[in-house]
Every structure is written in C-alpha cells, then in structure tokens.
Image (cartoon, helix red, strand yellow):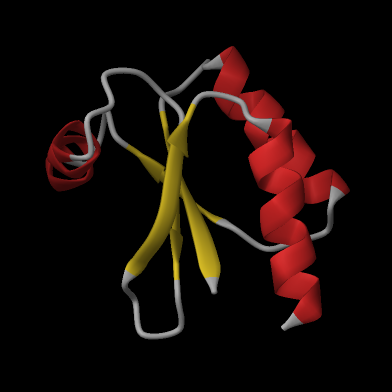
Amino acid sequence: MNATVYSLPACVQCNSTYKAFNRKDVPFNTVDVSEDPEAHAFTKELGYMQAPVVVVRNAEGEVQDHWGGFNPEKISAFAQAVKAA
C-alpha cells in the first residue's frame, strides 16, 4: 500500500499533509500537478479541483482510497493500515 500526494507549490494544506505523514513516519510520494499535466488531469477525473489530493493504492497499483484537502483522520487511518501490514 502506498500514498501519493498530488500537490501545488506554496500550498498550505499540502504542506500540512506532508508534515502529518512525516509525523506518522509513513512513506509517501509527491507529484506537483502544476508540472505534470497527466497528474492534473487524473485528479480532475477523480473530481477534485484543488490540492492536495491524496491517492492510496494497494500493492497491485489499484486505487483503494482518495481524498482532497488536509485530512488528519484519513492520514492516521492510512498510517495504522501501513503499520499493521
């Protein structure tokens, strides 16, 4: 299971999301949607119009969960799932 944070530069909610993942000591990837048109299109297809968008994929690479904005509860749940695996 892995998480990718689709973000924008100087995004306060994005930075809060990074800090929360780091505090939980779980790895995550970042993608700057301002520099990656395919990633930007992907987040729009999921229905999001602002950053960050967090996408959780299972070991097979399938989207398991996603959310928009800074969401400490979702980050905690993800961290618990990673540590339990």
Counting from the top left corner in percent of width and height, residue 63 is at: 34, 63
- Point out the image quarter for the C terminus: bottom right
From the viewer's perspective, is 14 left or right of 47? right
Residue 54 visible somewhere in the drawing = no
Looking at the image, which residue is at 34% across and 76% down? 61
Where residue 18 appears, x then y in whole percent?
67, 38
35 sits to left or right of 54: left
Q: Is residue 42 visible?
A: yes
**Percent x, y of residue 33:** 29, 34
Residue ID at (68%, 45%): 75
Is residue 78 toward the left or the right of residue 59 in the image?
A: right
Quadrant that contains the N terminus: bottom right
Q: Please determine whether, in this image, residue 64 is positioned above or below residue 8.
A: below
To which quarter of the image does residue 73 belong?
A: top right
Q: Position of residue 62 (x, y in %)?
A: 31, 72
Q: Nearer the viewer, residue 15 or 66?
A: 66
Q: Nearer the viewer, residue 59 or 13?
A: 59
Residue pictured at 69% horizontal, 26% vertical: 16
| Nearer to us in this view, 7 or 67 | 67
Q: How many callouts does the rendering have?
A: 0
- As drawn, 32 above or below 28: above
Reply above or below: 51 against 10: below
